[in-house]
Amino acid sequence: MSRVVLIARLAARDLRHRRAQAVLLLLAIIAATATLMLGLALNGVTSSPYLRTKAATNGPDITAFASSPAQAALLSGMGGVSAHSGPYPLASAVLGFRGLAVPVQAEGRDEAPATVDQPDVTEGNWVRPGSVVLERTFAEALGVTVGGRVTLNERSFWVSGIAVTAAMPEFPGVCYYMTCRADSQAEESGMGLAWVTQAAARGFATSASPVSYVLGLKLRDPAGAAAFAAAHGPVSPSGPVSSSGPALLTWEQVQDADNDLVSVAQQVLTPGAWLAMVLAVASVAVLAGGQMAEQTRRVGQLKAAGATPALVAAVLLAEHLFLALVAAAAGLGIGWLAAPLLSSAGAGLLGVPGAPALTLGTVGVVVVVAVGVTLGATLVPAFRAAHTSTVSALEDAARPPRRHAVLMAISRRLPTSLLIGVRLIARRPRRAALATASTAITVTGIVAVLAAHHAGDVSAGRFDWFAGLSDPVSGRVSQVMALLTVVLVTLAAVNAVVTGWATALDARQSLAVARVLGGTPQQVSAGLSAAQVLPALPGSLVGVPLGIGLFAVTNGAGGVSVPPGSWLAAVVLGTLAAVASLTAVPAILGARQPAVLILRSEAA
Amino acid sequence: MNDPLLSARALRKAYGRGDTLVRAVDDVDLDIGAGETVAVTGPSGCGKSTLLHLLGGLDRPDAGQVILSGRQLGQLGERGLARLRRDAVGFVFQGFHLMDELTAVENVELPQLLAGRPPQAARRRALELLDRTGLADRAKFLPAALSGGQRQRVAVARALANDPLVVLADEPTGNLDSAATLEVLGLFDDLHRAGQTLVIVTHDSRIAAAADRLIAMSDGAFTGETRLANAGGGPRRLAGLEG
């Protein structure tokens, strides 16, 4: 027991002594664990808002699209159907508002409420002659409010209400599973849903685009909706509504479609969280290594006072384990609090999902990953410290630097600052490799975000009639990508500072000698910066194709999107400039300390 | 003495404050002529190394001035001081301070590369210096593979790389055994004979005996100065005390 207390006390003392490094380490692990927590927390968060909406509207278990009243009558009389609403006429129309012309599915309804599938009016009133009620997500994307005026096929209507439904997916997924009788371009880009009177809906039909019918079917066994749909109608995405049969949409399919917002966010967050984890590993590895370079003498003192190698390793591991646990708790908390911001199912459903449940599995994964990352990065330096000779540790003999003959030979021909920078890289090639990897991961993330934005711009440009609307899915994707960019850039910034600091610390004696021999402080600090910027260069260049590839993988069938060359050049140059400025601080501080003080302290 | 190469006037440097104030260099005046070898001796902590650092522009005095070849060091910025150290001063330390990852020849050529000399010329000069210091066959060895005496000879060669006006050596034999001390002594003797200006801070009486002048220091001040007769001549004590 006393041994545990001793380890805890030694670890606590050291943490207090190195607050800045402890904070950097915490920051790195918190950013990674919070992102991971967010990714895990988005599982199934839309289920409760959808079910709440279905209950409030007495939503159907099957939404059926029929081509004729006879076909509709057949469907409503089928076995297993306990109640139904409709058939209601459904027509394609073009909604005009503030210069926009947006395709809509106009559903003709009775003024009296239906027993099955009565949309829940969240604002205003239900349809009456001359009025239109708009689906809430669609109304928000348009910017229309109750009392406003719109046109449908150039006839003027006033917006009497805004409502939600569980019978059809919210905007822009109204034509989910190609259940609409609209052209493919409209289906691909999203249509709005509007309720009008039956007479008005019939009035929108033309010979080219005749009216069809929609029914809401309640089943005796709602769980058997998929089996019912498979038995009675083509519902596959590859099988659009045929002239011969009805299209049947199950309530689970509508729920899945409404989950698009969150599933897309999760699709982006999960790989992002793993990228953040890799960056956190790099931060922790450099911090632990840097800490050992700083603490060689303390290790010697501990061992000279009788500490065993195991105790020395245990103290170092205990410090980082404690930080990992604190960071995991903070990451869980931040992720849990932030999840509702990304898990809101959109305006098309009632209620908000609230903070996700903290399941034992989620907590376990986050804690295990945080501890695993930290211990994985700390084990090597801890083992090395434990087995350092006590005498050389007391003499503060720094870990012997490596010698890379080719780099040494190349550096002789370079200007002084680059000579210093290249030789610093050659001393610690593994640290340089970590810096390269860290930059590559960050640039990968940023380029993937740019590729997504570019893809969005292109599709908005292709469907110019859609350009005026804000797409909730791409809005949510932008939100998540912005969050990921912030996390990745934060972690990369921590890495750059930590690597610069570790390099300045590790090479302080060599740099002091260089200054004694005539290297100016400017040359030395520029050399230190060069030692960070040079490994960042290949990292940024590699990150460009990796980012394009990452987006292509997460985009699935959406394909490859290559952002313009000017964007990519700006990312590479901006990254290098950011690394240079972030590492300038430790570099300048390192070069400002009088060389004689460093040499004196090294010799003491 | 003709115009001195290196001078110090009313030089002061203190560390700490109040009760912990230590006057490391306390009102020191010094003139060193070109080609002269001066040894500074005194007990540990008397301020010898601090004086050496002030003379070489590695540290700045609290008061007074250092003039090297007509240039006042106090008027130079950090960059100017760095250039002065590069072009006019060579340092030799007790702890050698060689770069572990560089071979002997790479260590010796480093000051020249820092000065912007072409790599081929720097390498030629480094090999010449290693030859002069008896280490031609050790040019490609890393410091870890050299003995203490050999490392210090590499450090001396490095100090000479840019043809400095003055070489400042801080306890150059302090970390060496007897045999290695003799190697380094011989090297300093050669430099002395070649007319290299040397200021050596030392505890070693053999180095001190080989100097032209011996300055005793205590509590930051000069307590005595002895002019020694070279080439077998006996020491010549100067009248009075300075500092």
Image: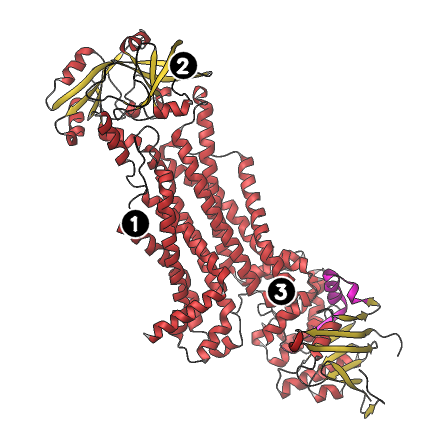
Residue B125 % position (x, y): 72, 68
Decide if residue A12 is on the left or right side of residue B224: left
Residue beneath label 1, please?
Answer: A362
Decide: marks 2, 3 in contact (CB < 8 A)?
Answer: no
Residue A441 seen: yes
Residue beneath label 2, please?
Answer: A150
Label 2, label 1: how far apart the Cα atoms are:
47 Å
Q: Residue furthest right?
A: B2
Say if the magenta span includes residue B77.
yes
Decide: marks 2, 1 in contact (CB < 8 A)?
Answer: no
Q: Residue furthest left?
A: A79
Q: Nearer the viewer, mark 2 or mark 1?
A: 2
Share a chain, discs 2 and 3? yes
Which SS class for mark 1? helix
* Residue A511: image tag: 3
Residue B177's place in the image compared with A473, above or below, is below
Which SS class for mark 2? strand
Amino acid type indicated by mark 3: Leu
Q: Earlier in the sequence, mark 1 or mark 3?
A: 1
Decide if residue A177 is on the left or right side of residue A278: left
Residue A144 % position (x, y): 41, 20
Amino acid type indicated by mark 1: Thr
Residue A127 % position (x, y): 30, 15
* Residue B220: image tag: none
Q: B220 or A69: nearer the eye? A: B220
Amino acid type indicated by mark 2: Val
**What range is drawn magenta here?**
B72-96
Which SS class for mark 3? helix
Q: Earlier in the sequence, mark 2 or mark 3?
A: 2
Q: Which residue appears at 38% of the width and 60% of the height?
A: A376
Q: Label 2 marks which chain's residue?
A: A
